[in-house]
Amino acid sequence: MKDVRHNWTEKEILDIYNMPVLELVHEAATTHRKFHNPSEVQVSSLLSIKTGSCSEDCAYCPQSARYATGIERHSLLPLEKVIESAKNAKKSGVTRFCMGAAWREVKDGPDFEKVLEMVRAVNDLGMEVCCTLGMLTEDQAKKLKEAGLYAYNHNVDTSREYYEKIITTRTYDDRINTLKKVRDAGITVCCGGIIGMGESIKDRVGMLITLSSFNPHPESVPINLLIPVKGTPLGDSKPVSVWEMVRMVATTRIVMPKSVVRLSAGRVNLSREGQALCFLAGANSIFLGDKLLTQPNPEANEDLEMFNILGLKPREAFKRIEERLQSTIE
Ligand code: SAM
Ligand code: DTB
Ligand code: SF4
């Protein structure tokens, strides 16, 4: 059977997700070793370049203007602050720098011009530059590419069916259209979602059907564990068990064998042992640094210590899948 498939069925993915968990981890670890160097982890860091006051109603998000979450809001950061933050990240071994803005969509004008400058500046530091700015037009995607943007993050978040329970101010198809524009502009795609929002296992599988139907698959797939933030509609959500995170990561690895699977938000609520199982099950990217966009992440020192214990090492920048495959074979 072909290694990379775009026609996974619900039954096939459900059967994988529901395997006895150790069998599942073994299968995912085997797939992982076929396509990736299992001791390499891609290390990214996040900077919120514009925080809060977002017009959207995403039920999980502390940055929506509709919920009182007490986060510190700010308009677009000055270029120097961004460069300083990227330089610091580079010093701690980070190879991908991701800039996030709490926008529904990008608007042409001075702010977008400033973002283009930021992209150029971070690219000049020799880092992979990623942005997550909301919806884009074709022209904006092209301009970001020309400025040196390497990846664009735009998540489908959940299944098509569950999506409308979480977000009403834009549609699943709006998201997919932006992702198409990103792909057509020649930017790599970073697209995943969240578990722990009250969705069913079928919804998790539905999200994986959407993601794996993209051809090519997204180069990165972030799996976020919901951080329940007080003031948001999902602030009182029950925590999901670590086994569900392990199952989700493992299933993602099997269904999209060549993609980088990122353990994204929510690592503060996972033990080291829990994260180790996720790495075994095919996760091969994290965010380093004590803050995500607005919410806490483990301290960088603790993560570097975890890497030491687990024998993991940060992967160098711009290493594409073909080169990684080569280094796995060597
Ligand atoms: N405004 C842009 C957008 O929506 O695409 C970019 C920023 S948005 C914060 C990026 C992603 O962060 C969301 O799609 C969601 O998957 C994730 N996220 C936001 N809040 C979260 C939370 N409380 N827990 C886990 N993931 C979260
Ligand atoms: C993604 O999937 N997770 C990151 C990144 N893409 C931009 C964001 C996580 C945000 C967690 C909530 C916060 O810090 O505000
Ligand atoms: Fe706005 Fe993005 Fe948060 Fe939704 S996820 S409220 S679009 S910042």
Image (cartoon, helix red, strand yellow):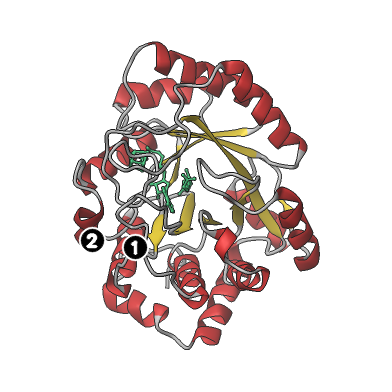
The picture places residue 53, in percent across and down from the top left corner, at 35, 31
Is residue 126 among what the camera can see? no
- Name the residue type under label 1: Met
> Residue 171's image quarter?
top left
Q: Residues within 10 Å of mark 1 (few under 14, many from 20)?
A: many
Quadrant in which the C terminus is drawn: bottom right
Marker disc for residue 294: none
* Percent coordinates x, y for residue 28 in the rendering: 54, 74
Give the residue drawn at x 57%, y 20%.
120
Q: Residue at x 29, y 72 (%)?
A: 200
- Asked if one can make out residue 48 in the rendered structure from this viewpoint, the answer is yes
Disc nearest the viewer among 1 and 2? 1
Residue placed under numbered mark 1 in the picture: 197
Relative vertical location of residue 137 with respect to residue 297 in this rendering, above or below: above
Q: Hey, which quadrant is residue 248 in on the image?
A: bottom left
Q: Earlier in the sequence, mark 1 or mark 2?
A: 2
| Amino acid type at image mark 2 | Tyr
Q: Nearer the viewer, residue 147 or 104?
A: 104
Q: Is residue 209 left or right of residue 34?
A: left
Residues under numbered marks 1 and 2 in contact, where contact means CB atoms less than 8 Å apart: yes
* Total marks in image: 2
Residue 290 versus residue 247: which sits nearer the camera? 290
Rendered position, 253 above or below 114? below
Between 274 and 256, which is closer to the camera in this rendering?
Answer: 274
Q: Quadrant of the N terminus?
A: bottom left
- Number of other residues with Cα within 10 Å of mark 2, as a class: few under 14, some 14 to 19, many 20 or more: many
Q: Residue at x 30, y 65 (%)?
A: 7
Measured Cα–Cα span from mark 1 to mark 2: 10 Å
| Residue 225, position as x, y percentages in the image | 46, 61
Q: Which residue is mark 2?
A: 162
